[in-house]
Structures are given as structure tokens and as C-alpha cells.
Amino acid sequence: MINNSANIKDFVREKYGERARQVTQLTVLTNISEAESCADGTCETNLDTSFGAFSNLYAQAELEGLPLEAIASSAGCGNPTALAGLKNGERVLDLGSGGGIDCFLAARQVGQNGHVTGLDMTADMIMLAQKNAASLGVTNVDFIHGEMEQIPLPDASIDVVISNCVVCLSPDKDAVARESFRILSPGGRLHISDMMSLGEVPETLRNDPEQWAACVTGAEDRDAYLSRLGNAGFTNISIEEEEGTARIYDLSAPAVISVKVVAFKPN
């Protein structure tokens, strides 16, 4: 863990809580394109633009029928459900589920025989997601308040763990890897989108809450990512750059890129 982990976690919680509160006030949204522009920080509202989703992450057909608030609250860097190969009847956990966009997409794929759980440490996001679920009338999705470093679920209770630009926000990524491994059933898989650094991040920036919440300085390099997952017990680990996502540059930090990460729990 980093030296300033408690302060960083509190800052991230408040930052994303404020995003959820702002989204609930976006009553002017009337269509998907407006909601998408809010997600990537370009709509004309007071929505925080210091972090936000990359544009063009989701096909229009995927977004049809979803609550506009779920789309606007997204701050992801990929589309983990698009490539996860979710199957009917599977049990899915979304780490850092936010307003629920990836949970709702996953729920369509696993069907009524499957189930999707969204986990978020931000109470305002949980309330927003529950409101969105109620408006959709979905019955195979639930949202729980908790932290991904201590997942409040039993051992081997999940088939697939997904996440969208959230693991990089944790100051204790070893715990996230261990907990993800614990709750996966034998043969289960981790299939996440996340940010990866292309170089070493200076220690001073590692302890900067603003940079951390922006998904920049919490990102780790490829070797660190592979090591953490391997130490947790995962096998067949692959990391690939997401196509069509921009690189973020900061004058005092290395570039970070959006990647898709796949790993398996042995049978």
C-alpha cells in the first residue's frame, strides 16, 4: 500500500460521490448522445470534467433502453462486458459498479438464470444504481455497499469478475487481487478494463489524491500488474491495450493507457 492510502481512498470516495450527486441533477438530459457527452465531460453542465469516460466505449445498440443517468455517471476506460464472453446463468461481480451501466449490460447476457452483483464503496453511487435498476425493472441485478479490498461475498460464489477503470483507484491492489481470487469459483475468470502506466510514476505523484482520482497515478506498469495477479494465484494472464482509447499524458507523469486484463482461477 502507499503511504497516503486512507486519505486517497476518502478523496476518491468523495469525488465519485459528488459525481453521482451531480448526475441526479441532470434533468435536462433527453437522449443517449447527451448522456454520453456528460460521461466524457463535454456536456454543458457542472459535471466534474477532471475524470470521465473515454468516448465511444459502447455501441449505441448496447445503450438503448438504459437509464440516461447510468450512462452519464460512467467514468470507465473500456467495455469489459463486450469481450467477457458472459454466458447464460453465470454469476458476475462488477467491482466499482458506479451507476450500474456495466451491470445492466452484463445482466442482459447472463439472463434470468444468472445474476449480477455491483459492488461500490460510494453510498451515493449505490443509491443511483438502485434507482436505475428500479427504473429498468431488472430482477437479476443487485448492488451492495462495500470495498473491493474486502469483498463482502462468500468464497467461490462468483463465476466472472468484471471492472471498468476502478482497480487503478485502489491503494491496496494486492488485496483486490487476493479478494477477487477468493470469491471466484474454480475455473472462474477476471475480465476487467483498467489503466496501465507506461513507466514508473514518481512517489510524490503516487500520494497526490487528485491525480489518483483521475486514474493517472494509481496506474501501475505491466510487470507490476502481472506480478500482483500471479501472486494471488491467477494463471493464463493476458494484458492488451484497448483499441480506440486515447492515451492520457501528464507533464510530470508517464503516459497511461486503457488495457483489457484477463486472468483465470485454476480448476
Image (cartoon, rainbow, N blue to C red):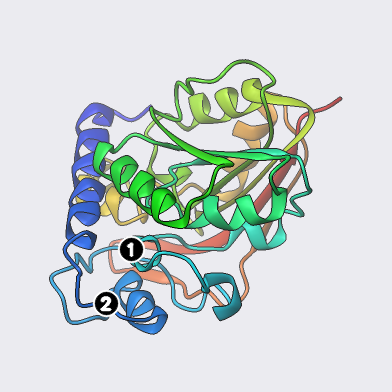
Task: Please state the horizontal and vertical placement of residue 9, each as a whole percent of the image.
Answer: 27, 34
Disc 1: which residue: 69
Disc 2 + disc 1, Cβ < 8 Å: yes
Disc 2: which residue: 29
Q: Amino acid at mark 1?
A: Glu
The span from disc 2 to disc 1 (Cα, nearest Å) is 9 Å
Left or right of 134 in this view: 12: left
Residue at (24% x, 80% y) in the render: 43
- Give the image quarter of residue 253: bottom left
Q: Which image quadrant: the N terminus?
A: top left
- Give the image quarter of residue 60: bottom right
Task: Please state the horizontal and vertical placement of residue 168, each as a whole percent of the image.
Answer: 44, 46
Task: Please state the horizontal and vertical placement of residue 22, each as a whole percent of the image.
Answer: 17, 60
Task: Please state the horizontal and vertical placement of residue 172, each as a whole percent of the image.
Answer: 42, 29
Image: 63 above or below 267: below
Pick whichever, 165 or 120, lies toward us: 120
Image: 182 above or below 47: above
Q: Earlier in the sequence, mark 2 or mark 1?
A: 2
Q: Total of numbered circles in the picture?
A: 2
Secondary structure at numbered mark 2: loop
Pick whichever, 233 or 121, lies toward us: 121
Image: 22 above or below 98: below
